[in-house]
Amino acid sequence: MQYVFKLSATLLCLVLLAAPAIAADVNLSVAASLKEVINELSESYARKNPGVKFVKNYGSSGALAKQVENGAPADIFISANTEWMDYLKNKKLTDSASIGIFTYNTLVFAGAPGKAASMKDLTRLEKIAIGSPKSVPAGEYAMDAFKKAGIDRQLEKKLVMAKDVRECLMYAERGEVDGAFVYKTDALLAKQARILFTVPQELYPRVTYPMALTVAGAKNRDATAFIAFLHSGEAKTVLSKYGFATR
Amino acid sequence: MIPLASTDYDAIRLSLQVSVAATLLSLPFGFAFAYLITFVRFRGKVVLEVLVNLPLTLPPVVVGYFLLLLLGKHGWLGSLLNDAGIRIIFTLKAAVIASAVVGFPLLVRSLRIGMEGIDPQLLNASRTLGARWHDTMLTVILPLSLPGLIAGSSLMFARSLGEFGATIIVAGNIPGVTQTIPLAIYEYASSPASETMALSLCLVSVAISVTVLFIHEVTAKKLARRG
């Protein structure tokens, strides 16, 4: 009995000691496509500022926004589109003064070499993977581009909708589809598939990654310092290393 | 009346189609496996049992990925079928196969419980009366495992209605072609503008599941009383 009491007392002490450490952590909620970039940047920041600990949560922008809305601990939110940032802004969950643009991405068509060289060639292909336009922004941009190029009708029957960009790329890698519309940064990670062409920017709205401090994050000094670091030149170097456009 | 788009009606129809097809397709195999495991003694039975039950414990995504490797253009079965002009990936067939594999253990399990409950004296009696093994199977075992059959099919049907993880990998998420109710809900739920649509489709899904499980309970009770 006494043993149980001692054990629980020790545990209680441990929990109480650990609590202040948790308070100093910086909780990041970041769109999954930025995983490699944020991992590298947070490591380099933590090396220069010992004592700062990052708790990283990667997922789809929508899922992350819903988590923040329901009270998940998050100091910084980086979304893969402006829609979900506006969603949190309208619910007054972000510190609106801190909202800024982290980076940009470009839409490309990736597949086995030689399948296509421009939007016009797409009509000759059999199967094309895009993200579900209703839920995956990259898929929505691809649909916009088809409409602007006037080939949406011809492609209708050829489209395979995937649940996210990485799944599109997986289909292209395995040869299940002729090619897939993905972000340049994802295509650079592919082993088999190559970037066949870049979708002309005038065909779709610019892919923007906004970032902001949450209301809780605005009170966390480490979080405000880290977001300043994300605007720095070093962050831009890392971003371009992974294929993101910084301007 | 809750608002539903035309693709939602497609999704409901496709879900029912997939679940019915997957259940019917699995019934003969399920019966054969349950029979083997319950009545036939052979080496390596445990291995078979583990294999049959594997999809129950594996993440459906893993099942889906294995199916993609197997049935894909370069998979060993998929490439043969591809030469024969049959395409499985990204069609409703893929959704049916995914649901069949994931729901199969539930069917076998219920059938087994039904078969294990059969009085061995009845089987011995039929044998002493000169029945061959297939006579015994069709005239004694099949009618007596009917409750298990119905329980298993309705469970499997319900499981197929909810199949998501394996389906989205092998069948994709194509509205009107392979988009079943769970996939449509997933799509709605991941966009801020369509939360009410997601909710109304959720209600449809709940209604169908409740109906199926209700039928499951009622028939199981009736059969239990009769038997």
Image (cartoon, rainbow, N blue to C red):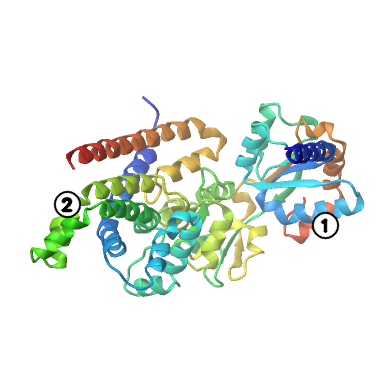
Please give the count of numbered marks on the rendered protein. Answer: 2
Residue type, numbered disc 1: Thr
**Residue bearing the label numbered 1:** A237
> Residue A77 versus residue B137: which sits nearer the camera?
B137
Where is residue A182 shown, x and y percent of the image? 59, 57
Q: Is residue A94 left or right of residue B9?
A: right
Disc 2 packing (10 Å; few <14; some 14–19; many ≥20) = few
Q: Is residue A227 visible?
A: yes
Disc 1 packing (10 Å; few <14; some 14–19; many ≥20) = few
Where is residue A81 shown, x and y percent of the image? 65, 43
Q: Element at badge 2?
A: helix
Chain of the residue that carries numbered disc 2 in the rendered image: B
Residue at the spot 25% in from the left edge and 37% down from the top edge: B221
Instruction: Check contact, mark 1 vs mark 2: CB within 8 A.
Output: no
Q: Is label 1 on the same chain as label 2?
A: no
Q: Is residue A169 above or below residue A134?
A: below
> Residue A122 versus residue B10: which sits nearer the camera?
B10
Residue at the spot 62% in from the left edge and 35% down from the top edge: A66
Residue type, numbered disc 2: Pro
**Residue bearing the label numbered 2:** B143
